[in-house]
Image (spheres, rainbow, N blue to C red):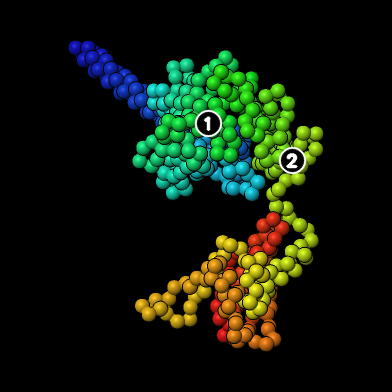
Amino acid sequence: MNHSNNRLRILILTTIYKGIWLTGLLLTITLLSMFKANATELKYFSSLRYNHVSLHAGTKGILPISEQQAAKQRHYVFKYNEVGKLIEIINNTYQNVKLHPLTHFGAKRVKIDYAKGRKTFTFYDINDRRMLNIRGVFKEVYRIDDTGFVEQLNFYDADDKAMESRWNIAEYRWHKHNNLVIEQRFNAAGVKQPLSPYFHFNDTAIEYDEIGNPYRHYNIDEKFNIVPNSNGMAYYQDSYDEQGLHTKYAYYDQHYQLTLNAWGFAYAIKQYDTQGQYTGRTKYGLQDQAIANLYPTVKKDNRKDADKIKQVSLSYLKALQSLDPELMKTVIHPELSKHTVPPFPAPNGKISLRETSYKRLIEHAEHWNKSGMKFPPVTNNNVTILDQHNNIATVKMVSDNWIEYIHLVKLNGKWQIKNLLWDYNRE
């Protein structure tokens, strides 16, 4: 009898232990499943493929790098969910003077959500608040058909109401025609819009290369014929290297011959550094001759600039002294910002900045010193260039009456005073 009881007790305990073990196993599997469901994968890239002209081609990371490399350079972080869908892009880059503003989405973070037949991009700033992206919209919603083809895009504001982009586009529509993707654009009223305000293609046909890069964009009529626009351009062509970097763009007429674009060049070759960051371009004409860029360049010998900066600064006072409004117009930029802190408070007891407008300064040059008593017979003006970088400069000017801090800008080879902050010289 005792032996039977012992065997029964052992059987019961074994069953209990197995139940506990199975329960623990199931709990472990459940926890692992939950962890997997919430798991994400991070990938790091030096650059993006972001087609600023047509949004039909998706955003793609270019030049993958390690997490350790990313800590030392500008980069983008791509976050994927457990099934490999891209759910977030974090922009850890900063603007470069040579970076075209429309080669990225222009926000700190973009969150990507999926629903049946929908893909939504929402844009956030550095404080994780919703913001306008580079196109001037808060949200982009793509409509996707059952085959995965992107067929429509609509823009929305911060209240999720339909809106137009900075290019006056509220909706893109795409459909296939042979091996091409036909693109049409509409404003909020349903009126067709050009490719962009500065590039007047009407309906366009997008040709993709064998690996899915947008290769050619054709200007077409209602019968899908390739036609020139008002500048003689019928299509433009993009080229990419084996890493995916956009290396060349060129312009052609309807006869597939190179033609000049509205900015006077036929094609451009882009350059990149070892990290894949864009460093500049070389433009070419129809005869493959290089065309000088219009971008500002740094001069090694800036002695002439320094002399001109001092001359312009002094000419501002000379125009006041000698009643010469034409000289004043020459040395002062029309968007002048000139202010001082007045030595005495206003009648309400508050002290606030006092402004002198461009118009008022020209008027001062006409009559302010008519008495000849605003300046001493022999003036004592001292100009010190505090800093100069390319086409901007900061100057401190001490005269008999004033101490002034001046910002100057060089536009089209001409130095002018843009900002001026002054106070009385009480020394």
Query: In percent of the image, x 44 and y 19: which residue is there?
Result: 145
Q: Vertical placement of 272 versus 148: above or below?
A: below
| Picture coordinates of residue 330, whole percent (x, y) | 66, 66
Of residues 93 and 192, the one drawn nearer to the viewer in this rendering: 192
Of residues 60 and 202, the one drawn nearer to the viewer in this rendering: 202
Q: Vertical placement of 405 versus 118: above or below?
A: below
Query: In percent of the image, x 68 and y 69: which residue is there?
Result: 312
Q: Name the residue under label 2.
A: 282
Drawn side of residue 310 relative to residue 5, left or right: right
Of residues 386 and 187, the one drawn nearer to the viewer in this rendering: 187
User: Where the N terminus falls, by quadrant?
Assistant: top left
Q: Answer whether residue 308 is visible to the viewer in this image.
A: yes
| Picture coordinates of residue 27, whole percent (x, y) | 34, 26
Query: In percent of the image, x 64 and y 79: which residue is there?
Result: 321
Q: How many marks?
A: 2
* Three-letter code for the amino acid on which mark 1 is drawn: Leu
**Mark 1 surroundings within 10 Å by alpha-carbon count, few (fewer than 14), some (14 through 19), many (20 or more):** some
Element type where label 1 sits in the image: loop
* Three-letter code for the amino acid on which mark 2 is drawn: Thr
Residue 76 position by quadrant = top right
Q: Mark 1 points at which residue?
A: 55
Query: Which label is found at residue 295?
Result: none
**Mark 2 surroundings within 10 Å by alpha-carbon count, few (fewer than 14), some (14 through 19), many (20 or more):** some
Q: Answer whether residue 57 is visible to the viewer in this image.
A: no
| Picture coordinates of residue 63, whole percent (x, y) | 63, 34
Discs 1, 2 touching: Cβ within 8 Å: no
Element type where label 2 sits in the image: strand
Query: In percent of the image, x 78 and y 40: which residue is there?
Result: 290
Q: Vertical placement of 166 versus 320: above or below?
A: above
Label 1 or label 2, whichever comes before in sequence order: 1
| Picture coordinates of residue 230, whole percent (x, y) | 63, 33
